[in-house]
Image: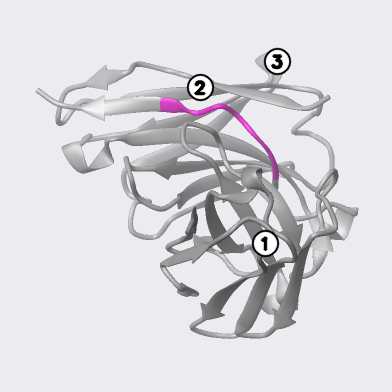
Amino acid sequence: QITLKESGPTLVKPTQTLTLTCTFSGFSLGTNGVAVDWIRQPPGKALEWLAVISWNDDKRYSPSLSSRFTITEDTSKNQVVLTITNMDPVDTATYYCAHRLFPSRGGAGGFDVWGQGTMVTVSS
Amino acid sequence: EIVLTQSPGTLSLSPGERATLSCRASQSVPYNYLAWYHQKPGQPPRLLIYGASGRATGIPDRFSGSGSATDFTLSIRRLEPEDFAFYYCQQYGSSPLTFGGGTKVEVK
């Protein structure tokens, strides 16, 4: 059974750096075709894709946010970490991590398992 | 970047009725890699449809997806009470991945 769980601070101040951790089980990020993505959702608004790290360590970011975002993995701990610098109140959102299996490896390609999300508020 | 536009913004229907949701892409979605999700308040989204028309594991057959290239549709044959929620389309054929703005299906 695949599970993912996000963790991190619930409140950060403007200009601070946010570090979010996605701890997963039931799969290995080293398996061909597997990826873990980060998606966020401001209160009452739509979903926004942020970043992905794939089995081959390929990393992609949303172009509008890429200069502030870094995605890394800790294989030994089954964790994916998203770091966001220079936080702003507009970054207030629920942050989700999600599992993907690429279609080339027989997967759906969409986000088939999601974490419950972690709400982050940016306020002084 | 592929921009996805969903319509209508809100769909007011009664249980048992059919729902038809639209997702239009600003350019052709490679390989028709288009997914649909539904989301209830306070919960993460759940994958319904992938590859434009494939039903995800555990999704009842009253949900169906169709379309190709730039025009995609999610149909819900007979609305059940648990189907009243927000629905999002998402493309994963081209980076950056993008979501539509969502359609709310509400009880009339």
Q: Are marks 1 and 2 on the same chain?
A: no
Please state if A10 lies on the left or on the right of A5 as rendered.
left
Give how far across and how far down residue A8 sits, in percent: 41, 17
The residue singled out by tag 1 in the image is B35
> Looking at the picture, does residue B29 appear above or below residue A80?
below
Distance (Cα) linking label 2 and label 3 = 14 Å
What residue does disc 2 label? A21
**Relative to B78, does residue A27 appear above or below in the rendering?**
above
Q: Label 2 marks which chain's residue? A: A
Numbered range of the magenta stretch: A112-118
The residue at 26%/27% (across/down) is A121
Q: Residue at x 64, y 43 (%)?
A: B82
Amino acid type of disc 1?
A: Ala
Q: Secondary structure at mark 1?
A: strand
- Location of residue A109 by image quarter: bottom right
- Whether residues under marks 1 and 2 lie with C-beta atoms below 8 angstroms apart, the answer is no
- Quadrant containing the C terminus of chain A is top left
